Image: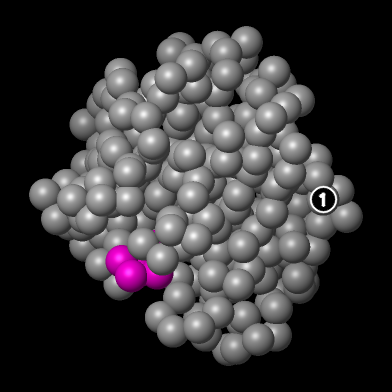
Amino acid sequence: MKLACWNVNSIRARHDRLMAWLERTEPDVLCLQELKVVDESFPREALAELGYHAAVFGQKTYNGVAVLSRTEAKQIVRGFGDDDPQSRFLAARIGQLHVLCAYVPNGQEVGSDKWAYKLAWMSRLRAYLDEYCSADDRLVLCGDFNVARDELDVARPDDWADSVLCHVDARRAFETILDWGLVDVFREHHPEGKLYSWWDYRMLGFPKNNGLRIDYVLATKCLAEKCAAAEIDRDERKGTKPSDHAPVVAEFK
């Protein structure tokens, strides 16, 4: 099984790139973040022509998550079951696999209301795992977490120190989610680090490789043990109108 995670930064802007990437790489499951469209505007028909079903939790202009799969998703859950207006979480059963797709808030500035929302949102994610999921299940949590786990995931740590992406409180919240019973499968295959999934559009971030790894495929132990490979498709950040994120791809036996 090939499973991937990709913040496309607008499904409309990245439509042609997404379709070409799917045709070329043929993942079985793809978790998407930052759709920036309502459900009705999601390109279901074009994806169906490529053999993909889509579970979608969209939002106009901002946010939005989706899970694409060869097998139709069942037991779809959109959001955490509260009154949060932001579309950032979707869970579904795909065969025997429990898939969770998350787009964690950026936080904007440490100490701001959006920063408090980010930390609270990550706590809600951990609470969801506690209440509705089992660490003994074949489960993957994929998404843009807007957190670089540690200094191995940051090209220039001094430049990002205490930012919303690297602050100790955000990293602590991320580790709390991992501690539920999840394995960072990319880190397992690349313990040396210094490989990134996001580069700022500004200041020649990508040409200078001034990147951060903030996109993750996290798996329960029983599934992580079957992970044969994990890579970041850096080439997808090149060319015309790329997302600022590159896909993270994991293959399981």
Magenta stretch contains residue 50: no
Quadrant where the C terminus is found in the figure: top right
Tell me the residue at 61%/82% (across/down): 205
Q: Does the image show residue 246?
A: yes
Span shown in magenta: 14-18
> Could you say where residue 202 lies in the image, as x and y percent from the top left?
52, 85
Kind of residue at disc 1: His
> Could you say where residue 40 lies in the image, as x and y percent from the top left?
11, 49
Quadrant where the N terminus is found in the figure: top right
Q: Does the image show residue 62?
A: no
Tell me the residue at 62%/80% (across/down): 206
Magenta stretch contains residue 17: yes
Report which quarter residue 153 is drawn in. Answer: bottom right
According to the image, label 1 marks what residue? Answer: 190
* Count of marks, rendered view: 1
> Could you say where residue 230 lies in the image, as x and y percent from the top left?
70, 47
> Could you say where residue 190 lies in the image, as x and y percent from the top left?
82, 50
Look at the picture and state if 218 lies above or below 109: above
Q: Main secondary structure of the magenta part?
A: helix
Tell me the residue at 25%/67% (across/down): 12
Tell me the residue at 64%/43% (across/down): 250
